[in-house]
Amino acid sequence: MTSHPKTKLHGDLPSASSKAALADRKELAAIAFERTRMPMVVTDARKADLPIVLANKAFLQLTGYAAEEVLGRNCRFLQGPATSPIAIAELRAGIADEREVSVEILNYKKSGEQFWNRLHLSPIHGDDGRILYFFGSQIDVTEYRRIEALEASEHRLLMEVDHRSKNVLAIVDSIVRLSDANDPALYAAAVQHRVQALARAHNLLAERGWRDISVHELVRQQVTPFAATRAAFSGPDIKLQAPVVQPVALVLHELAVNAARHGALAASQGRLSISWTPAPSGAGFKLRWQEAGAGKAPKPTKRVFGTAIIGALIERQLKGHVEKKWSNDGLLIEIEVPSSQPGTR
């Protein structure tokens, strides 16, 4: 680093505990600058492009450049395509104001490898107050950033698992509370089948990475085991978001079980038609469950437990609406699930 012989730099010098050390402090400071493990550079503020006039070994090791590739150049050679313009603007403002500035900026090594640089710039003035140099120190915080990102990702994952667990537990709670408990054996079987229906929906979500599932796919999964050849499906491509899939799956399971035990699928000539459309509001969806050939309406107790679960899931959990209409030939059930959950594509 070259400076005018009569120019005295303004700034704090290292403390010294002896006269010998005091006399040698400039040389010792230069050695400390070179040997410290913290990457450091000094740029000449009296020249237009603030060229680097000093770069220590740690800086060269961090960036992968040789001394001759660094000296005389502006530090912008460390910038690259993903370097934030905002961070650059913050640095330029600090330089223009001749003040200290600290910023985390994405830089690039000679190899092209990215690294997060916690950069601190500090101005060095002469005794006349004129700016002479900028001292810059760097800390590679890439690993810290990576760990921070992992922790944030882990936190989001735990929150998502917590949300999904609560969603499933709420459904299981409905299953346990609303299943017919008069006969222990039948109660156990009913709970088991309902949990299995829930598990099938869960597996489907897991296979798709917890992404949206189509109504058609969910209907087929839950209804086909009970009506392989006597059910017709129709409707546009409507997607259900993950939180909606499991409660809707259990509703479909209940409807299919009821149809198989007491409705159209229990009659030899019975038929089942399931269709879906976007909700009238344009958001959400509407499901139409039509049973034909089921005969007269069964006694209320026949379907009371299944319909209780359906009501709890649709009306309480999903804030939707269920409407049932009996005719001499069968049953029509219309279910509407509101906007914020599913979307059409």
Image (tube, rainbow, N blue to C red):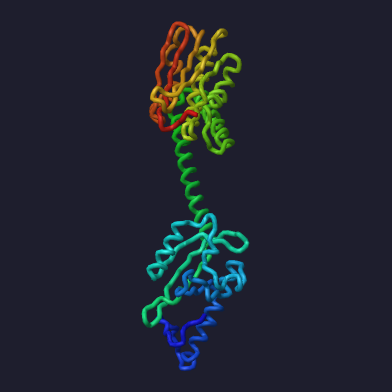
Q: Among all residues in the image, which is located at the extreme front?
A: 48
Residue closer to the observer: 227 or 119: 119
Classify 236 as above or below 8.
above
Mark yes or no: residue 269 visible.
Answer: yes
Looking at the image, which residue is at 46% across and 60% down?
88
Query: Residue 163: x, y in percent?
Result: 45, 41
Looking at the image, which residue is at 45% across and 83% down?
14
Residue closer to the observer: 184 or 110: 110
Query: Residue 78: x, y in percent?
Result: 54, 63
Query: Residue 325: x, y in percent?
Result: 41, 13
Classify 208 as above or below 223.
below
Total residue callouts: 0
Looking at the image, which residue is at 46% across and 87% down?
5
Query: Residue 232: x, y in percent?
Result: 55, 16
Mark yes or no: residue 40 visible.
Answer: no
